[in-house]
Amino acid sequence: GFRKVRKQVCKRIRHRLRELNLSDLSSYHQYLESHREEAEVLDFLCNITISRFYRDRGIFERLETEILPSLADSAVQNNYKQVRCWSAGCCSGEEPYTLQILWKLSVSPELSRNIPLQLIATDRDPSLIERAKKGIYPAGSFKDMPMEWKDQAFDVRGKSSHIKEIFKQDVQFQEQDIRKDLPDGEFELILCRNLVFTYFQENLQLETFSRMMTKLKPGGFFIVGIHESIPAEQNILIPSGKCIFQKRNIH
């Protein structure tokens, strides 16, 4: 279902060819035809693992100042117990932890009562999920993140930064392939950035998008990457600025 690969994927495939003692892609194609189990190996080689905190700063600034406060106010008015968010393709956890940091340090203190942000973060790579659960990151992961957030949310130990336990609360990591499975329940906010609408073929994009929309509540927000666009023929989402969409309220 992939339509695009990056340099890191090409590098992995070249390494795989050397492991199998194959000379070129043509010979690898023949190998795939005769070794069906290799398709699963290739599928994982195509996984993209680029991630860092506060990636695409403008998106997180809008989340902090507009979207998360709006969802929090709605929860207070409607007497909800929580706000639910899904981070799809969460990689090593930088995106969901960033959301939790913004919620706990900026949004929650302004509320009249405590409302947790319940985050479900999914990725198909079990090694990335394990890294995310540990919450330990090198300096390069923070090049986009405002220093005040890092100072408040992380303990520096040697050359790495460990996220404080309070920001791990209400974040649940699940090994899940978005092409096959979706998390349980509905969400007020879904982030699906730099995955489906960049790397998947068009038919798989449409299929995945339709399934994701069943998980987004009316009035909820859907966020994609800054260089991505959602299916043009859809009529479920209303644009709310660059990369940000809101689901229509259906009466």
Image (cartoon, rainbow, N blue to C red):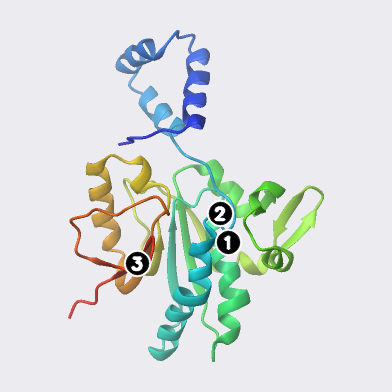
For residue 39, above or below residue 35: below
> Which secondary structure lies at badge 3?
loop
C-alpha span from label 3 to label 2? 21 Å
Q: With respect to residue 87, does 76 lie above or below?
A: below
- Pointer 1 residue: 97
What is the number of the mark on residue 93? 2
Is 157 positioned to the left or the right of 27 in the image? Answer: right
Check disc 1 and report its element: helix, strand or loop: helix
Of badges 3 and 1, the one in the foreground is: 1
Quadrant placement of the C terminus: bottom left
Residue drawn at x 67%, y 67% is: 149
Task: Estimate how packed mark 3 is, as few (under 14), some (14 to 19) or many (20 or more) residues with alpha carbons within 10 Å.
Answer: few
Q: Give residue 185's mark.
A: 3
**Left or right position of 210 against 6:** left
10 Å crowding of disc 2: few (<14), some (14-19), many (20+): many
Query: In the image, what residue type sits under mark 2?
Result: Gly
Q: Position of residue 91 (x, y in %)?
A: 51, 48
Residue occupying image coordinates x 45% and y 9%: 22
How many numbered marks, from 0 up? 3
Circles 2 and 1 in contact, beta carbons < 8 Å: yes
* Above or below 106: residue 156: above
Label 3 or label 1, whichever comes before in sequence order: 1
User: How far, Cα to Cα, is label 3 from label 1?
Assistant: 20 Å
Q: Which mark is residue 83?
A: none
Quadrant where the N terminus lies? top left
Find residue 54 and report its horizontal and vertical position in percent.
57, 59
* Comes first in the chain, label 3 or label 2: 2
Q: Is residue 146 left or right of residue 111?
A: right
Residue at the image position 36 percent from the left and 40 percent from the top: 199
